[in-house]
Image (cartoon, helix red, strand yellow):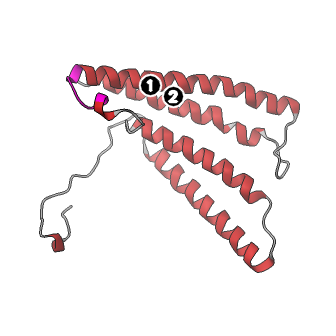
């Protein structure tokens, strides 16, 4: 890829490439696209209905909040897999290679532990939602329809962190 001719520069601009992973990163990318499209569609539909009828769909706000949470977790999984999660780059990307590798592995291990713990503990939340028959506040559907995704997506993030930990261990 080259810069536009109006800048006068013809240097190639490097494109970011993803590391090879066992589970394709396209999964998170496509889930992000699908969730964003759903958010846009239901929000647009609600705007049209409100404009023309002075009413609104009752379910759109509740479902939009759910989709935003899913989007955050899916994007978090992609960020961990691409090693783009939040960190203090001054320490993580500077200094001796050995320290950078150790910090990268430590960060990946901590992310793994955190999201593995969230996955385990959130299974109890799902169980309680089912056991007590909790329903959502807005439209009254079973609450576990929403909460079941927390342990699933937390497990995905933990898996991506474990993969990053292993890739950083192999890197020379």
- Quarter location, residue 171: top left
In-image side of 70 versus 111 (left or right): right
Mark 2 is surrounded, within 10 Å at the Cα level, by few (under 14), some (14 to 19) or many (20 or more) other residues, namely many
In-image side of 76 versus 1 (left or right): right
At 67% from the left and 63% from the top, the residue drawn is 42
Asked if the residues shown at circle 1 and circle 2 are in contact, with their CB atoms under 8 angstroms apart, the answer is yes
Give the camera-side residue of 134 and 167: 134
Mark 1 is surrounded, within 10 Å at the Cα level, by few (under 14), some (14 to 19) or many (20 or more) other residues, namely many
In the image, is residue 123 part of the stretch drawn in magenta?
A: no
Residue 90 location (% of width, % of height): 29, 32
Question: What is the tally of numbered marks visible in this picture?
Answer: 2
- Residue for badge 1: 162
Give the camera-side residue of 133 and 137: 137
Task: State how far apart marks 1 and 2 are (Cα).
Answer: 6 Å
Q: Can residue 170 be seen here?
A: no
Q: Quadrant of the N terminus?
A: bottom left
Give the camera-side residue of 92 and 134: 92
At 50% from the left and 40% from the top, the residue drawn is 76
Q: Secondary structure at mark 1?
A: helix
At 58% from the left and 54% from the top, the residue drawn is 35
In-image side of 60 versus 18 (left or right): right
Q: In the image, which residues are magenta?
A: 91-98
Q: Can residue 144 be seen here?
A: yes
Compared with residue 148, is residue 54 higher up or lower down, i.e. above or below? below
Q: Quadrant of the C terminus?
A: top left
Residue 47 location (% of width, % of height): 69, 71
Residue 112 location (% of width, % of height): 49, 24
Residue 74 location (% of width, % of height): 53, 43
- Quarter location, residue 103: top left
At 46% from the left and 49% from the top, the residue drawn is 29
- Residue for badge 2: 158
């Amino acid at each position: 890829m080259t810069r536009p001719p109006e800048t006068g520069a013809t240097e190639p601009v490097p494109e970011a490439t993803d590391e090879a992973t066992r589970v394709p990163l396209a999964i998170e990318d496509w889930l992000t696209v699908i969730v964003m499209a759903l958010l846009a569609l239901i929000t647009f539909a609600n705007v049209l209905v409100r404009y023309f009828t002075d009413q609104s769909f009752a379910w759109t706000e509740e479902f939009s909040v759910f989709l935003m949470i899913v989007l955050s977790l899916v994007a978090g999984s992609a960020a961990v897999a691409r090693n783009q999660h939040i960190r203090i780059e001054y320490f993580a990307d500077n200094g001796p290679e050995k320290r950078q590798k150790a910090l990268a592995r430590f960060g990946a291990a901590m992310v793994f532990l955190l999201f593995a713990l969230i996955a385990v503990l959130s299974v109890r939340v799902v169980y309680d939602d089912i056991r007590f028959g909790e329903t959502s506040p807005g439209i009254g559907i079973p609450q576990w329809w929403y909460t079941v995704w927390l342990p699933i997506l937390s497990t995905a993030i933990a898996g991506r962190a474990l993969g990053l930990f292993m890739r950083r261990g192999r890197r020379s």
